[in-house]
Image: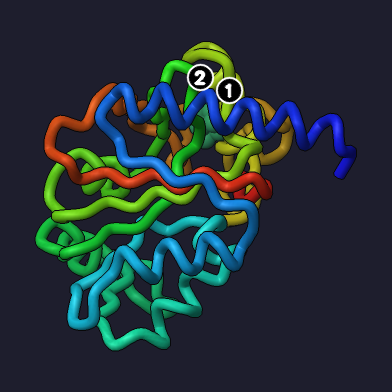
Amino acid sequence: MDQNVETIQSIHCERCKKALENNGFHVNIAKNKAEILDLVNGMIKDGDVVCDGGSMTLKETGILTMLKQRDIVFQSHNEPGLSRAQSDEEARKAFSADVFLASANAITWNGEIINVDGHGNRVSAMIFGPKKVILVVGVNKLVEDEAAAIRRIRTIAAPANSVRLHKETPCAHIGACQDCHSADRICSSYVKLNYDKENRIHVILSLEPFGY
Ligand code: SF4
C-alpha cells in the first residue's frame, strides 16, 4: 500500500483508539495478522467457553483456525450443516460464554461501534451476556461519523454480505441498500455501542484491512 495512505490510516487508528478508550472500551492496535493472533490468544484462557458472531474478519485473520487448535470449548452457530433450529440453539450459548468474538461494521472517530444485524444474535451478545467480548476491526471500517458508518453499511457491508450469503436481496444486485422488505433481508437491527461501563469489550484495531 502507498506509504502516505498508510500514514493517514495509522492516524485514523490512533484517533479511534483514544476515542474508544474515552468511551470505556479496551483497545489495542495490531500491525498485521500475526499481532492480531497474539493479542487474541493472550485474551483467551485454556478451558474458556468461546463463541463467535460469524465474521469474514475472523476467517481472514486466521482466528477461527487458531481457536480450533486451542484447548478451549469453541461453540459456533456457523458450523456447516446446522439446521436453523440448531444454529439458534448454538447462538444462544454465546450469552453464557466466557469469550465472544466478532468484528464490527464500522467504528467512528468519536469511538462509537456501529453494527447492523439480520438475526440479532451478534449484536445481542455484544451488548449483554458473554463475560468478555473481543472485536477485531480492520482499518477499512473506521469512519468519520455515524452518517458515514450507515453509508458504509448500506453500500458495502450489507451488499457484500448479501452476496457472500447468497441472499436474494436488492442490494446484492444493485450494490446499495434499497430498504427492502425481502424475506432474505440481512439488516434488521442497527445498533450503536456508545460506552462500556462493564469492562467487557476489547477492540483490536488492525492496520491491515479485513472483512466488509
Ligand atoms: S434492507 Fe435489504 S436492500 Fe437494504 S441492505 Fe438490507 S438486505 Fe440489502
Disc 2: CA contacts within 10 A as few (<14), some (14-19) or many (>=20): many
Rendering coords of residue 113 (x, y %): 39, 30
Does 47 appear above or below 204?
below
Using residue 179 as the reference point, say whether residue 171 is left or right of it. right
The residue positioned 46% from the left and 72% from the top of the image is 64
The residue positioned 56% from the left and 71% from the top of the image is 62
> Helix, strand or loop at disc 2?
loop
Amino acid, disc 1:
Val
Front residue of 149/12: it is 12
* Nearest to viewer (mark 2 / mark 1): 2
Front residue of 185/33: it is 33
Rendering coords of residue 34 (x, y %): 59, 67
Using residue 123 as the reference point, say whether residue 149 is left or right of it. right
Q: Which residue lies furthest to the right in this view?
A: 2
Q: Is residue 203 visible?
A: yes
| Mark 1 C-beta to ligand 1 under 8 Å | no
**Mark toward the start of the polypeptide (2 vs 1):** 2
> Which of the 4 quarters of the picture holds residue 54?
bottom left
The residue positioned 19% from the left and 73% from the top of the image is 49
Using residue 10 as the reference point, say whether residue 81 is left or right of it. left
Does 56 appear above or below 68?
above
The N terminus: image quadrant = top right
The C terminus: image quadrant = top right
Q: What residue does disc 1 label?
A: 143
Using residue 24 as the reference point, say whether residue 63 is left or right of it. right
Q: Is residue 86 visible?
A: no
Q: Are marks 2 and 1 in contact (CB under 8 Å)?
A: yes
> Helix, strand or loop at disc 1?
strand
Q: What residue does disc 2 label?
A: 109
Amino acid, disc 2:
Trp
* Label 2, label 1: how far apart the Cα atoms are: 6 Å
Question: In the rendered picture of this protein, how many numbered marks are placed on residues?
Answer: 2
